[in-house]
Amino acid sequence: MILSGKEIKARLGKDIIIDPFQEKYLNPNSVNLTLHNELLIYQNTELDMKVPNPTESIMIPEEGLLLEPNRLYLGRTVEYTETHNLVPMLEGRSSIGRLGLFVHVTAGFGDVGFKGYWTLEIFAIQPIRVYAGVPICQIFYHTIEGDFEEYKSGKYQNNRGIQASMLYKDFEK
């Protein structure tokens, strides 16, 4: 089942942490999360799954940043989240999608026990100006059935910023 907005609010500070939490972003069954002012772009046009790919940081100025089509931008939420006993999910907002902006290309599914900022895989269909602080996505929560272990992987857990792909670590095993 998906938690209602009222249930999300009731669980804040218990098995759901959203910091900062803004009441105005509480929806009937989700909470809007906002875009941080930093983005990462990969420096190389050809990426390799087996190695760390170099990135470059760009800042979103007050007047916004025009995103280029067919380029991947990595962003993050302003909000830090922790989720226990629930499965967090991230979706783009329909108002954002209707402008041709994809907020997560594939990674909208979180693990029970995730702690950190959400890295956003941002892709624009056409040129679009984005602004820091805009409510760009929404988090919602599923209950989980059966025994489980919380996510503890060192790959993305407890992150403090935007996380480029660490798939290369899977090849080290």
Image (spheres, helix red, strand yellow):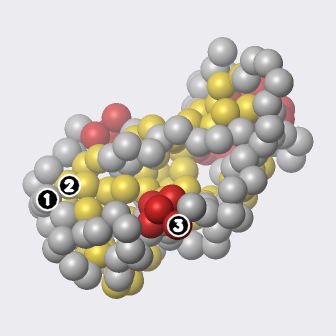
Whether residue 162 can be seen here = yes
- 171 w.r.t. 87: above or below: below
**CB within 8 Å, label 2 to label 1:** yes
Q: How many marks?
A: 3
Q: Residues within 10 Å of mark 1 (few under 14, many from 20)?
A: few
- At 19% from the left edge and 64% from the top edge, which residue is drawn? 71
Q: Position of residue 119 (x, y in %)?
A: 49, 59
**Three-letter amino acid code at disc 2?**
Ala
Residue to which mark 3 is pinned: 172
Q: Kindly report which numbered mark, 2 or 1, lies closer to the viewer in this rendering.
A: 1
Residue to which mark 1 is pinned: 70
Residue to which mark 2 is pinned: 124
Q: Position of residue 5 (x, y in %)?
A: 67, 28
Q: CA distance from mark 2 to mark 1?
A: 6 Å
Of the residues under marks 1 and 3, which one precedes in the sequence? Answer: 1
Q: CA distance from mark 1 to mark 3?
A: 30 Å
Number of the label disc, if any, that sits on residue 54: none
- 21 w.r.t. 58: above or below: above
**CB within 8 Å, label 1 to label 3:** no
Picture quarter containing residue 110? Answer: top right
Q: CA distance from mark 2 to mark 3?
A: 33 Å
- 71 w.r.t. 97: above or below: below
**Three-letter amino acid code at disc 3?**
Glu
Please state if 148 lies on the left or on the right of 36 as rendered.
Answer: right
Of the residues under marks 2 and 3, which one precedes in the sequence? Answer: 2
